[in-house]
Each structure stands twice: as C-alpha cells, then as structure tokens.
Image: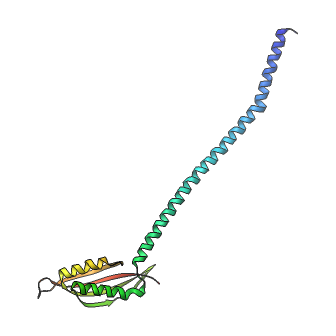
Amino acid sequence: MTSHFRKVVFFVLLLGIAVVGYQYMIKPANRHLAEAKGRLQTRLAKLAEFEKATAAAEDLSRQLGQLQEAIEFFESKLPSTIEIDRVLQDVTVIGEKQGVKCKLIRRLKKKDNSGYIEQPLKMELEGNFNSFYSFLLELEKLPRIMKIRELELEKQTKHEGQITADFIVSIFFQSS
C-alpha cells in the first residue's frame, strides 16, 4: 500500500465517519432542538395570553370596585322607607322657610322597581315666584335623590308675581 492510497482511504474513512455522525447524531439532535423550540414558543404564546387575561382580570376587579363604590354612594342617597316622613318634613320645612304655602301634599301609588322604590308625591304650592324658585334650589340641595315631574306654573291674576305651582316630586327609597 502506498502512502497516497493510505491517505485516500483515511480521507474516505474520515468522510464516512462525518456522514454517519451527521446522520445518527447531529440530525436527531437538530430535530430534538427544533421540537423543543416549538414547545417553548407554544408555552411563551400561552404565557402571553395568561398575562393579558391577568391584566384584564385586574382591570375588571378595579372596575368592579369602582362600581361597588358608586352603588354604595347612591344607596347612601336612598333613604329607607321608614324615613319617608322625615323627608316629607324636610320638604315642608323648606317650603315654609322660603315663604311658599303648601296647599296640598298627597302620596300617590308607590312604584316598586328592582332595588329601589319610587314614592311620587303630588304637591300644590302657592306663593311668590322667587320664593318658589328658592324652594326648588333648596330641594335640590337635599342629600336625597328626587325628581320633579309634571310641573305646571300658573300666574295669579289678582297679585303680581304670585304663582300657583302644581307638580309631582318623586322620592326614591331603598327597597326593604
């Protein structure tokens, strides 16, 4: 065997070892690495989704807290049905204080809604327009939720500046 032939055989042998090593070692390792990268990408995508869901849940929790505070605020503005006489007394005192004469205060039929009760009151007042306007401003300052409907003002022909007001004021209460 000549030295040149030995070199060729050695070269072929090295080349064969490289091909066999690539086929049986490097190719499976690359395939395993690609599969691991795919699983990692899938897990990272799920992690990103969970982070978004967590952020959304925290945002919903914050919004729920804000809504709970708003509900508590409005419930504090709604007296219980036991306090209706006190609210009526407040309205009467405001009317007398502003110089408006109460001709009629009559309870109408209650309206029971989900979570609250609306008690409409038919009122007829008589007096000076400025006094009536002051009465409405004071009524608005009460720490209760109220609504004025069907307001009718009539000018009295006998006395200048005197009016008769006919309206319905609804007072809202918590349902028991």
Q: Residue at x 57, y 53 (%)?
A: 51
Q: Quadrant of residue 138?
A: bottom left
Residue lying at the far right in this picture: please name it: 1
Q: Can residue 109 be seen in the rendering of this structure? A: no
Q: Is residue 105 left or right of residue 62?
A: left
Q: Answer with left or right where residue 158 lies relative to residue 53.
A: left
Relative image position of residue 119 (x, y in whole percent)? 37, 84
- In front here: 37 or 89? 89
The residue under the point 40% across, 86% down is 83
Q: Splitting the image into 4 quarters, where does residue 127 fall?
A: bottom left
Q: Is residue 47 above or below residue 33?
A: below
* Quarter occupied by the N terminus: top right
Q: Residue at x 49, y 62 (%)?
A: 62
Closest to the observer, 68 or 34: 68
- Give the image location of residue 115, x and y in percent: 45, 78
Seen in the image, is 150 located left or right of residue 128?
A: right
Q: Quadrant of residue 91?
A: bottom left
Q: Position of residue 33 (x, y in %)?
A: 70, 38
One can see residue 59 in this view: yes
- Residue at the location (82% across, 9% down)? 4
Q: How is the image coloured?
A: rainbow
Q: How many marks?
A: 0
The front one of 64 and 69 is: 69
- Please provide percent x and percent y for residue 157: 12, 86
